[in-house]
Image (cartoon, rainbow, N blue to C red):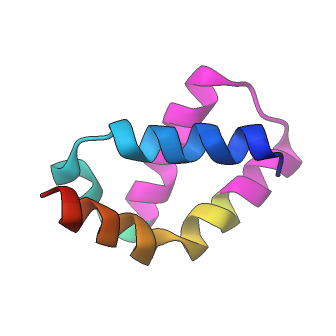
Amino acid sequence: MTPLMLRQLWSLVDATQVALLLNLDDASLVQWLLRQFRIQQPLNPEEITILSSYIQSKLSLIRDLAHQKD
């Protein structure tokens, strides 16, 4: 994953409504973030897999950040 992709992902997380980040279950949140990311930038299948795994590994951090904004 490139540094640009990381910045884009975390910008997307920051711009997402807190209620959405907190209320979706894990699988739905991963899929929603992937969908939104792919609107901004096309991804090949390998990038989708890498990004999906990365998001999954950071879900607790994403939710912690959302709680802080709440």
Residue 39 in the image: above or below residue 49: above
Residue 69, magenta (yes or no): no
Observer-nearest of 43 and 15: 15
Residue at image point 56% right, 70% down? 56
The image position of residue 68, as x and y in percent, is 21, 65
What is the span of residues highlighted in magenta in the rendered image? 27-51
Instruction: Tell me how many marks there are.
Output: 0
Residue 38 falls in which quadrant of the image?
Answer: top right
Residue 45 in the image: above or below residue 41: below
Task: Give left or right: position of 23 versus 27.
Answer: left
The image position of residue 16, as x and y in percent, is 32, 40
Observer-nearest of 3 and 21: 3
Residue 43, magenta (yes or no): yes
Q: Quadrant of the C terminus?
A: bottom left
Task: Give left or right: position of 4 versus 36.
Answer: right
Q: Main secondary structure of the magenta part?
A: helix
Residue at image point 23% right, 42% down? 17
The image position of residue 33, as x and y in percent, is 48, 45
The image position of residue 19, as x and y in percent, is 16, 52
Observer-nearest of 60 and 7: 7
